[in-house]
Image (cartoon, rainbow, N blue to C red):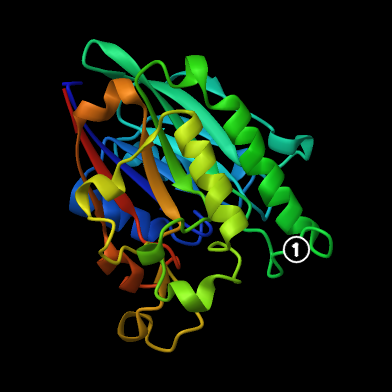
Amino acid sequence: MTNRLKLVTWNINSVRLRMPIVEQLIDEISPDVICLQETKCPDANFPENAFRKAGYDQIAINGQKGYHGVATISRLPLANVEKRDFCNVGDSRHIAVDIPFNGTSIRLHNFYVPAGGDEPNREVNPKFGHKLDFLQEMQDWLTGPETERPAVLVGDLNVAPYEHDVWSHKQLLKVVSHTPVETELFENVRESGGWLDAMRQFTPIDEKLYTWWSYRAKDWSKADKGRRLDHVWVSGPLSSSVKGTKVLREARGWEKPSDHAPVVAVFEA
């Protein structure tokens, strides 16, 4: 049945190290499609057999040794795989596929946007400049044909755009991921393509919403100093089909967790 789709996006922070909690996720919510970021392994070492054993035999990967990496794993057929090299630096930060839905297909983009380092100044921090250039290239590309069809864009986009996407708007205004130059560019990327912020359709903009909690906190849940770095965007033609999103906060507390929680999105025709 392809008129209902359950999709998960998750920065897994090393897929081989955290395969046990990926399997736990599969057991608990049984998604149709899993989009992972920061897989940190070359394609040849991706744990395909574990996914196939769990019933996911459609695997599209774009990996590299030790860093970055994205993967889209599915029980549904994947077609028209595309890997875009943003900024021409050879990083594995994007993969797109077509998945069947409601008699046609959805274009699914899986992104891992650069974090941007610690200093929000491109003159002294090339990583921050790279992040801004990456977002600008996203804006230039993700328009027209990419958004005139049913499409979903998910991933660790490494920007918390709104006041209640961070634990303290005031204290994080000069912290990378929430600086005005990032948040304004981020919204330009989304709005220029007509993308809908699906997560904020189901959690009002004046409510706190986080997907990431630092490893540095002794008790991450009690401190609750989170940020919403992971996102689900949908194109206009698909906007009426997104029926809900949810952050699986409890997964941040699983054994040997990622510092990100998975985000679930459900689509129905």
Tell me if residue 38 can be seen. no
**Image position of 76 (left or right of 68):** left
Could you say which is closer to the camera, residue 64 or residue 238?
238
In the current view of this chain or complex, which residue is farthest to the bottom? Answer: 218
* Percent of width and height locating residue 95: 54, 32
Q: Residue at x 41, y 29 (%)?
A: 194
User: The C terminus is located in which quarter?
Assistant: top left
**Image position of 113 (left or right of 89):** left
How many neighbours does mark 1 have within 10 angstroms: few (below 14), some (14-19), or many (20 or more)? some
User: The N terminus is located in which quarter?
Assistant: top left
Q: Residue at x 44, y 65 (%)?
A: 258
Tell me if residue 213 can be seen. yes
* Percent of width and height locating residue 217: 45, 85
Task: Look at label 1 and name its amino acid.
Answer: Asn
Q: Residue at x 31, y 86 (%)?
A: 222
At mark 1, the secondary structure is: loop
Q: Residue at x 74, y 57 (%)?
A: 127
The residue labelled by disc 1 is: 121
Relative to 122, residue 33 above or below: above
In the current view of this chain or complex, which residue is farthest to the top? Answer: 103
* Percent of width and height locating residue 146: 48, 20
Could you say which is closer to the camera, residue 43 or residue 210?
210
Relative to 78, residue 214 above or below: below
